[in-house]
Image (cartoon, grey):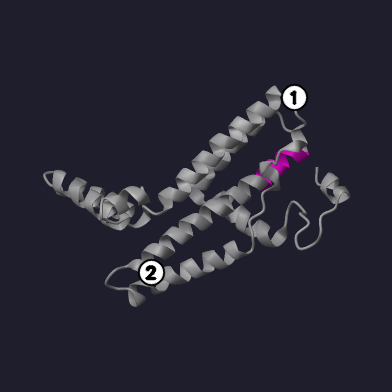
Amino acid sequence: MPSWAWMSNTTIPEIAEAIVASYQASLADLPVDTMAQVNTVLSAFKNLWPISYVVMGLGEFCVAWIGVQTAARGLRLPQDLLPHLAGFDAPLWTVVLLVASLLGLSLGSVISSTTGLVSQVSLNAVMVSRLIFAAQGLAVLSWLFRQKRMGPFAVAFLTLLAIFLELQFYIMTIVGLVDVWRNFRHLPRGKKVTVQDASNQK
C-alpha cells in the first residue's frame, strides 16, 4: 500500500481521509442517531488505521506459525524444537512505550490541537502495547496449561474464555503487564541461559 500511494502521488493518511469522507457522503441520508454511530466508527478508523499494519503482520505470523506446527507434526519433529507461546516474553521497553503513549494521549489535545497527530500516534501506540501485553498474558496462560498438563478440550475452552475476557475487560493485558514485574513463569531474565536452565523451564 505505501508503494501504491507513492505511485499515485498521494499519502496513506490522505487515502484514509478520502475513505472516511466518501463513506460520510454516501451515508448522509441515514437517520441522525444512526449517523452519529457511523461517525464514531469512521472517526475510530481515521485514527486507528496505522495499526492495521500490526494486525496484518500478526495475522501473517499466526498463519505461518500454524503452518510450521502442522509441518513439524507431519515430519514427526520433536515438540521442543520449535518455539512455544509459553516462552514469549515482552521486552521492558514495551512498558515505557505504554507509559509514554498514555502520557501522549493525556497531553495530545494540548500539544497538537490542530492536527491531532500526537493523539493519533499515542492511541496507536496504546493499541500496539495492548496487543503485546495480551500476548504476554496468553503466554502465561499457555505456560499454565503445560504445567497442569491440561487436555485439548480444556485448553480450547479456557483459551476462548480468556479471549472473551480480554475483549471485555482487558484481563490478559493486565496479566501480561503484571507478569513483566512478577515473572510468573520464572523466566531467566537478565542472565545468561544455559542448556540446563532451558531444560528446567520445560
Residue 153 seen from this side: no
Amino acid bearing label 1: Arg
Q: Nearer the viewer, residue 184 or 90?
A: 90
> Residue 105, position in %: x, y?
41, 68
Residue 118 magenta-highlighted:
no
**Residue, far front:** 7
**Total numbered labels:** 2
Q: Which residues are magenta?
A: 140-147
Viewer-nearest of discs 2 and 1: 1
Numbered mark located on residue 118 in the image: 2
Circle number at residue 107: none
Residue 186 x, y percent position in the rendering: 77, 54
Find out whether residue 141 is within the magenta segment. yes
Mark identifier at residue 76: 1
Q: Residue furthest top?
A: 74
Q: Residues within 10 Å of mark 1 (few under 14, many from 20)?
A: few
